[in-house]
């Protein structure tokens, strides 16, 4: 079971070695049945589109497989015991039997062994998939600074000097290196098909690394409830081929600047669409230039009361 | 003072816009405003007319006096227990209706539609979560422990009977505050966990979060006091010979839960109090600015929140232990192991709180440590499951209603345990945190775990409390309905969570989600039907109570002390405090022919007198908190003074006990005993039939 992140090529991604429990495959099947209905946007890690999500799915299936060792006997034996020892005359009745070392060792031992095994997986995968760490095997980082607003995300590309709202493009060869903060209440940034979620909090910065295996579109959203239009706070992450990405950057550069008026509109409670309307531009909402210190400013601890 | 100023002072910030139909007045041409206004007004009128109907009925039947002296001012642990359970069942009805609305909404919310406004949906999940935890599960288990534990340890009452009624008063006051928020809106939209900064004044200046803060604060104070009361009772009030290791397992779980309450509730009280300081007095504990930090809230809240889930589950484990041993006619397998496992769980539960926010950005190593400590809890829990299964092994298993709940519990709970282990792995939690997978997981623990346990206990001890059994057929319908409904309502949510659907979502655009939400709605309707079965069951059983009578007190061939006394038991529980010589003392008495003896040394019994303090403090707590919510400062001051006055006045009362004479006790007991001795013994095949008169032939004798 390779626990490194050397799984960029999906074909090489490790298949779960343990017998996958029925439950697991049922879930997977249910998910896959549901997938075609998603107009090309990938929404789940059960159909992983990046190395992190792929490893998370593998880990998930391993856990289900291991737990099946406990679950299946319980599911089978419980009704059997109730039926076999149902009320009536039977010789097996032993009203005072209440202890056996043999059973006791088995009862404590089995879960303990399973927990030890799962604990090893847990430790190694938690360290390996630490969202703060760059993905060892994916390409060069594309730095993105994400700011959570009510109810949209602003993505600043500091090295390119551009910014977008609810649109997160990146080249397939590279990996997204995200810094996150919130301009408002706590939020959680999540692109399930690619990998982990992480909170974004005011006055603090968190980090996250994600990569995609192939060009594609992935559903992203805020998962931490933050008020009326929480449900609308979704975005699309798009992995593009390098030349498409360059072309996309050129297009974004043509958009207007993220000036103080735009900042005020973003800071108000609205969705991306409403913000674009208020700015008098069409969706997608993009900015050709950004004040260089915008993210640092936003993520500073706030010294004075916000309005 | 002008009229305007006067009104401002009198009503604080309470205005017309607090009325549930105000949205309709404001947007008379908006269909959604109409629909939501009507739903809200319907709920509000249910509260108002429901309360009115109760008042009218009490008046017409002239029940006020007996309500006052028999119930409201009673400090009898049994009556208090029953009142807790009634509170829980009433609130459960409301919680269920809210759940149904949420499910119906999500089943129609594809492409950002759905009939509820986002505000309304937010209030629904917040009130539902708050009610189900603080005003259903907590009062239910507190009620059961209250009723059963003192009887099981052979005590006459809890250690602090008046404190007991104060706890009830405070809890009921919290529940009343949540009910009033239906009439004078709004409630919070911040979820049952009330995370700041969202619940801070800068983002939510209205009354909603304040309702939540004070309702939860009242309930947490009540629970802290309950914890102290129960644990002291277990330590101090056990009958002679009732060593710790002879206590029924339910008492052990009651003890562990009480200890958890003592240590876990104060962090919650502190968290809500600090949040209140932020909101009322411009402090900055959890604000975004001036050094506030919401991460402190997250830690405080879950320092309460995680032990809380074990507070909720342990008493249910206790009930299941009693159910399995009673209805298998066999001693509990691995009693000591079960005690040890319970203790392990109680201790470990304080070391795992961080798994509620693996995604907050702390180091991977820290996450891994908390992940592993979380998985460790799986070991004692797994052991318990197997111990219950081995209790059935070579037993005499009867599929009565409590047993149906218990079997459903075991099979569903291992599935919930599996998803719990999934969530304990930080790297996987990064995928399913904040999604419906999590919602499915905790309902999987709370419904088959806690709620089924409470319903099993309710069915098992109802005949003890009222002298007649609950109708078996309707009980089975309800139990099977709950099980099937649960599966349909919550297994789809696992799927939705894996498909990336977040919790608390009022609209979505992914067509893949639709079929799951529809199935979940069907399941929820089935649960509602099961709840209706419970109501019918109660009604049918009261109607047929003469046929279902088990006055002899032992309908299930019980093994522990509570079954040795009459049903319902006298106020003083036991005519003579029993002396215990073994585990399962009543079974041994029955087998040795020592049951139903008449003791020879009769003594006067001293019992606590009624006290109105609990009622007064509950009322005062409610009014004071209501004043705080709406900034009616005069009401707050008045309530505080009244509360203080009541406590002082009570401390001058010297005459706090009454004496029941030995003769009276003897007369009562002998009359009962003669009646019982005249009854034929019932065998277990008659358990669910009308032949069950509450005088049981031990199943062990039957088999000889
Ligand atoms: C009996 C049937 C029940 C149904 C159909 C039901 C349904 C729901 C639904 C639809 C939600 C909102 C999920 C979301 O966030 O999208 C929810 C949340 C919740 N439920 Fe239940 N529930 C039930 C019983 C219970 C019980 C018995 C408890 C506790 C003892 C409980 C505790 C909670 C909690 C704590 C939340 C979270 C609220 C929040 O997000 O802050 N529920 N439930």
Image (cartoon, coloured by chain):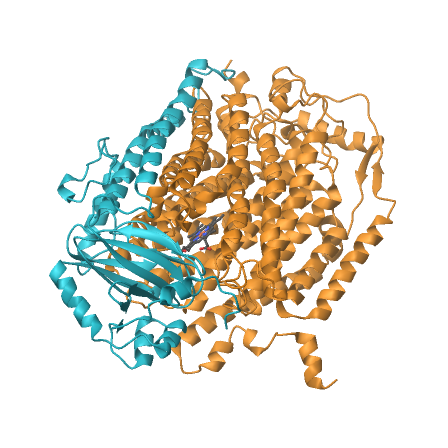
Chain colours: A cyan, B orange
Q: Total of numbered circles in the picture?
A: 0
Which residue is at a point 42% across and 73% down the rendered structure image? Answer: B35
Using the image as rendered, state which of residue A84 and residue A32 is in the foreground: A32
Residue at 72% from the left image edge and 23% from the top image edge: B240
Q: Nearer the viewer, residue A159 or B10?
A: A159
> Whole-percent x and y of residue B259?
62, 37
Residue A41, by quadrant, is bottom left
Q: Is A219 on the left or on the right of A179, as rendered?
A: left
| Quarter of the view holding residue B476 | top left
User: Which residue is drawn at the image coordinates 31% and 80% (left, top)?
Assistant: A279
Residue situated in front as seen by the camera: B167 or A236: A236
Q: B649 or A59, which is in the foreground?
A: A59
Residue B574 image position (x, y, % from top left): 73, 30
Q: x and y percent of residue B172 in the render? A: 64, 54
In the image, B204: left or right of B255?
left
- Would you say B371 lies left or right of B21 here? left
Q: Residue at x 78, y 61 (%)?
A: B641
Q: Quadrant of the N terminus of chain B?
A: bottom right
Residue farthest to the bottom, as pictured? B2
Q: Answer whether residue B693 is visible to the viewer in this image.
A: no
**Relative image position of residue A162 (x, y in whole percent):** 26, 68
A93 lies above or below B50: above
Residue B157 visible? The answer is yes
């Amino acid at each position: 079971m390779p626990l490194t992140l050397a799984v960029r090529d999906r074909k090489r991604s490790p298949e779960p070695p343990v017998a996958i429990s029925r439950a697991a495959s049922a879930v997977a099947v249910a998910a896959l049945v549901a997938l075609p209905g998603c107009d090309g946007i990938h929404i789940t890690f059960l159909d992983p589109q990046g190395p992190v999500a792929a490893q998370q799915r593998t880990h998930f299936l391993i856990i289900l497989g291991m737990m099946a060792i406990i679950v299946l006997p319980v599911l089978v034996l419980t009704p059997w015991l109730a039926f076999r020892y149902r009320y009536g005359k039977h010789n097996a009745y032993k009203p005072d039997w209440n202890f056996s070392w043999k059973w006791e060792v088995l009862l404590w031992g089995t879960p303990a062994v399973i927990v030890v095994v799962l604990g090893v997986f847990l430790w190694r995968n938690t360290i390996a998939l630490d969202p703060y760490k760059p993905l060892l095997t994916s390409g060069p980082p594309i730095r993105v600074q994400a700011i959570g607003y009510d109810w949209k995300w602003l993505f600043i590309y500091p090295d390119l000097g551009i910014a977008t709202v609810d649109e997160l493009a990146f080249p397939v060869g590279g990996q997204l290196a995200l810094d996150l903060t919130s301009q408002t209440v706590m939020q959680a940034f999540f692109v399930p098909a690619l990998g982990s979620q992480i909170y974004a909090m005011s006055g603090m910065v968190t980090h996250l690394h994600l990569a995609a295996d192939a060009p594609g579109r992935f559903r992203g959203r805020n998962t931490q409830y933050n008020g009326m239009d929480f449900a609308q706070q979704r975005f699309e992450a798009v992995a593009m081929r390098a030349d498409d990405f360059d072309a996309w950057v050129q297009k974004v550069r043509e958009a207007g600047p993220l000036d103080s008026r735009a900042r005020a509109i973003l800071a108000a409670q609205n969705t991306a669409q409403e913000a674009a309307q208020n700015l008098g531009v069409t969706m997608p909402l993009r900015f050709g230039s950004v004040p260089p210190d915008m993210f640092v400013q936003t993520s500073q601890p706030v010294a004075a009361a916000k309005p | 003072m002008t009229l305007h100023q006067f009104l401002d002072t009198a009503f604080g910030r309470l205005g017309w816009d607090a009325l549930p139909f105000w949205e309709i007045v404001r947007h008379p041409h908006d269909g959604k405003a109409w629909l939501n206004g009507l739903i809200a007004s319907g709920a509000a009128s249910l509260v108002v007319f429901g309360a009115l109907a109760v008042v009218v009925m009490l008046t017409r039947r002239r029940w006020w006096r007996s309500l006052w002296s028999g119930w409201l001012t009673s400090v009898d642990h049994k009556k208090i227990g029953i009142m807790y359970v009634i509170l829980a069942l009433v609130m459960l009805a409301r919680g269920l209706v809210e759940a149904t609305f949420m499910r119906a909404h999500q089943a129609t919310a594809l492409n950002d539609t759905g009939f509820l406004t986002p505000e309304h949906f937010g209030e629904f999940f917040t009130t539902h979560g708050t009610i189900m935890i603080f005003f259903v599960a907590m009062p239910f288990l507190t009620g059961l422990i209250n009723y059963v534990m003192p009887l099981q340890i052979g005590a006459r009452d809890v250690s602090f009977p008046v404190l007991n009624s104060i706890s009830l008063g405070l809890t009921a006051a919290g529940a009343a505050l949540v009910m009033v928020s239906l009439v004078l809106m709004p409630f919070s939209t911040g979820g049952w966990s009330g995370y700041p900064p969202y619940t801070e004044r800068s983002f939510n200046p209205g009354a909603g979060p304040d309702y939540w803060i004070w309702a939860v604060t009242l309930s947490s104070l009540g629970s802290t006091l309950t914890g102290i009361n129960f644990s002291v009772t277990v330590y101090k009030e056990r009958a002679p010979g009732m060593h710790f290791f002879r206590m029924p397992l339910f008492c052990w779980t009651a003890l562990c839960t009480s200890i958890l309450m003592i240590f876990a509730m104060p962090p919650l009280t502190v968290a809500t109090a600090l949040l209140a300081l932020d909101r009322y007095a411009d402090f900055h504990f959890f604000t975004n600015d001036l050094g506030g930090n919401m991460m402190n809230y997250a830690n405080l809240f879950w320092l309460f929140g995680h032990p809380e889930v074990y507070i909720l589950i342990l008493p249910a484990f206790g009930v299941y232990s009693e159910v399995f041993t009673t209805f298998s006619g066999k001693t509990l397998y691995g009693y000591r192991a079960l005690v040890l496992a319970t203790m392990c769980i109680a201790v470990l539960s304080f070391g795992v709180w961080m798994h509620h926010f693996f995604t907050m950005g702390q180091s991977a190593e820290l996450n891994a440590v908390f992940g592993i400590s979380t998985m460790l809890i799986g070991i004692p829990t797994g052991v318990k499951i197997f111990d219950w299964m081995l209790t059935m092994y070579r037993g005499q298993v009867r599929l009565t209603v409590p047993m149906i709940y218990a079997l459903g519990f075991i099979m569903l709970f291992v599935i919930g345990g599996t998803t719990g282990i999934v969530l304990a792995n930080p790297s996987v939690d990064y995928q399913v945190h904040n999604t419906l997978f999590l919602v499915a997981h905790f309902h999987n623990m709370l419904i088959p775990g806690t709620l089924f346990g409470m319903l099993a206990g309710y069915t098992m001890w109802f005949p003890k409390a009222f002298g007649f059994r609950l109708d078996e057929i309707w009980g089975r319908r309800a139990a099977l309905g709950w099980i099937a409904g649960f599966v349909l309502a919550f297994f789809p949510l696992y799927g939705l969570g894996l498909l990336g659907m977040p919790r608390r979502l009022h609209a979505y655009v992914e067509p893949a989600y639709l079929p799951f939400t529809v199935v979940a709605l069907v399941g929820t309707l089935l649960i509602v039907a099961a709840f209706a079965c419970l109501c019918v069951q109660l009604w049918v059983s009261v109607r047929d109570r003469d046929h279902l009578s088990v006055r002899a007190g032992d309908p299930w061939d019980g093994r522990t002390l509570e079954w040795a006394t009459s049903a319902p038991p006298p106020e003083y529980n036991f005519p003579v405090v029993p002396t215990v010589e073994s585990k399962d003392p009543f079974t041994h008495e029955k087998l040795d022919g020592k049951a139903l003896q008449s003791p020879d040394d009769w003594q006067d019994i001293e019992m606590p007198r009624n006290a109105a303090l609990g009622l007064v403090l509950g009322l005062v707590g409610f009014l004071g908190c209501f004043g705080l919510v709406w900034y009616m400062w005069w009401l707050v001051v008045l309530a505080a003074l009244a509360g203080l006055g009541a406590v002082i006045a009570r401390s001058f009362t010297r005459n706090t006990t009454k004496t029941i004479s030995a003769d009276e006790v003897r007369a009562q007991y002998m009359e009962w005993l003669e009646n019982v001795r005249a009854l034929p013994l019932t065998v277990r095949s008659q358990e669910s039939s009308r032949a069950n008169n509450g005088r049981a032939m031990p199943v062990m004798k039957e088999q000889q």
